[in-house]
Amino acid sequence: MPSKSSLINVGSLNGDETTPLLRPSDKVRRAFGVLFASLAVLLALVRAYGVTPLLSLVGRRRVAFAVDVGCIPVRVMDESPVADFFEYDITGVTLQLRGEKPHEFGGVHHKAKFGRKLTRSGFSTVFNGEFTVPSRAEYGFALHNANGDTIFELGRNPRLPHKGMLMNSTCTTAVHAGGGVYYNRVIPKRAGEVMTRRRGGVYEISTTYAGCLKVCPLTVKLIATVNPSGGSADNVFGIEESKAATDAWRPYKGHFTQVSAGEFNTWGLDSNTGALAWTRNVDLNPFDRSNWNEATNNARHLSYPPDGPVVDFDAGYSTVYGVTRTVDSAGGRIWMRPVDGSGDWRQAGKYDESRLIQVTIGRSFLWGTNSLDDVHRCPDPCGPGSQWAFANQRQVKQIEVGDMDAFAVHTSGLQLFTTREDGVGGWSSIPLPPGFSTTINQVAVGATSLWMLDARGELWMCLLPCAGGGAFKKIPTAPAGMISIDAGKVPHENNRR
């Protein structure tokens, strides 16, 4: 047994435990033994769990980031360290990790190019990227615009962000380091509200730029087409309903004579050619038409001859309804298909009896008018064999249904009526604007307003519930020469996906 003088204390837990001083040869042998044992354990873990889950065991994990830049708060825009940054399109997003270049977050740091680049999802406002990152890493996101400028969401100080300036501080984490406190986003220790885990051991973090939401709230979009109706020049415009009365409408790629916006998807029809196409609402853009997906448009029932393309349609929550060419004195047949572009047309209502020339979808009912200027409704979904009910209103050239109300335009274009979306109760008249010297071409119903397009191509707005008369306001920012208008469906929680 060695003497006490050959023992050393290695700072053990209780101060009394000791470890023998190893001879050099013993050190080498034992070092190799520990190394081989560690490698054996590592190999066993890889075989048992795979490489990706193992990253979290050694302090790193694979994370898929998704950042939505489509709902940046006005406060963030006002406090941007780069003046007029948001006057230009956002062209890129990078993930910034503290400890990687530029090492610290800051408002306009010139080394932001070293961040990890995220990729835009289609033409949407969502940017995605999947990276291996340290557990408990501090992170944030930088925005890059078309003018070549960059801003960080976590502060404006080019060196030390002691508190979040642009970032919503309610979802940052206080990190104590170097005698100070840093308020940053932090990779959680485990899956939960901020981070979820999917198959394969990859974690997911979804958020909004400078905010705490996982995704931007769904908003109602107004979509319109303008003259010329012929040709192929781009003629589609759109805007969020909340901005339609004050901001310039954005031009989109695509040429249609009629457009309809559902909750998630927009459909367009060129009645000159019969071409029908759809796109995700988030992919509407002014750069490229490749977001539009062509859809079959030759409705046919069983062995009957095809009815050809639809001549009117409306996009709803889960279904698109359309009517084809006139087949008798009451109008054409009614058809339905999934709004997400899958499937094909199939009959809606009784094939030999249901006839309309125009359709519109509300929260729970499908409405329509026929060639006799009558109004009918059918519970949505209105499938094969469903019954249509007369809506007790005649001399109507267009019917439009929103989340709560239905609106009818008289055949003269000089009268406007309303009732409940479910058809319960009677109809009441809505006064037109004072001095209104033209006729109503079309109406559309959004979440907050009734939108009226007149025969001159000018747009009017009336806040719901619309009292009419002086409550109508002309919209000076609307595109000129408008020929069709539609408002997207009001989002409902049970429809979220």
Image: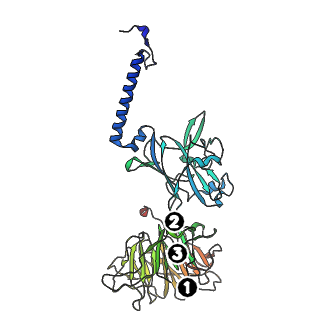
Q: Of label 1 and label 2, which has the lower sequence position? A: 2
**Looking at the image, is 326 positioned above or below residue 132?**
below
Asked if one can make out residue 312 in the rendered structure from this viewpoint, the answer is yes
Asked if one can make out residue 465 in the rendered structure from this viewpoint, the answer is no
> In this figure, what is the number of numbered marks?
3
Identify residue type, mark 1. Answer: Gln
Residue 169 percent coordinates (x, y): 57, 47
Q: Is residue 350 left or right of residue 161?
A: left
Q: Which residue is mark 2?
A: 283
Q: Which residue is mark 1?
A: 415
Kindly report which numbered mark, 2 or 3, lies closer to the viewer in this rendering: 2
CB of mark 1 within 8 Å of CB of mark 2? Answer: no
**Looking at the image, is 354 positioned above or below residue 240?**
below
Residue 421 percent coordinates (x, y): 45, 75
Secondary structure beneath dot 3 equals strand
Residue 290 percent coordinates (x, y): 50, 69
- Separation of disc 1 and disc 3 at Cα? 20 Å
Secondary structure beneath dot 1 equals loop
Q: Residues within 10 Å of mark 2 (few under 14, many from 20)?
A: many
Q: Of label 2 and label 3, which has the lower sequence position? A: 2
**Quarter where residue 239 is shown:** bottom right
- Separation of disc 2 and disc 3 at Cα? 17 Å
Identify residue type, mark 3. Answer: Asp
Kindly report which numbered mark, 1 or 3, lies closer to the viewer in this rendering: 3
Q: Is residue 342 left or right of residue 467?
A: left
**Closest to the observer: 434 or 185?**
185
**Looking at the image, is 19 positioned above or below residue 280?**
above
Residue 244, numbered label: none
Kindly report which numbered mark, 1 or 2, lies closer to the viewer in this rendering: 2
Q: Residues within 10 Å of mark 1 (few under 14, many from 20)?
A: some
Q: Which residue is mark 3?
A: 486
**Closest to the observer: 478 or 89?**
89
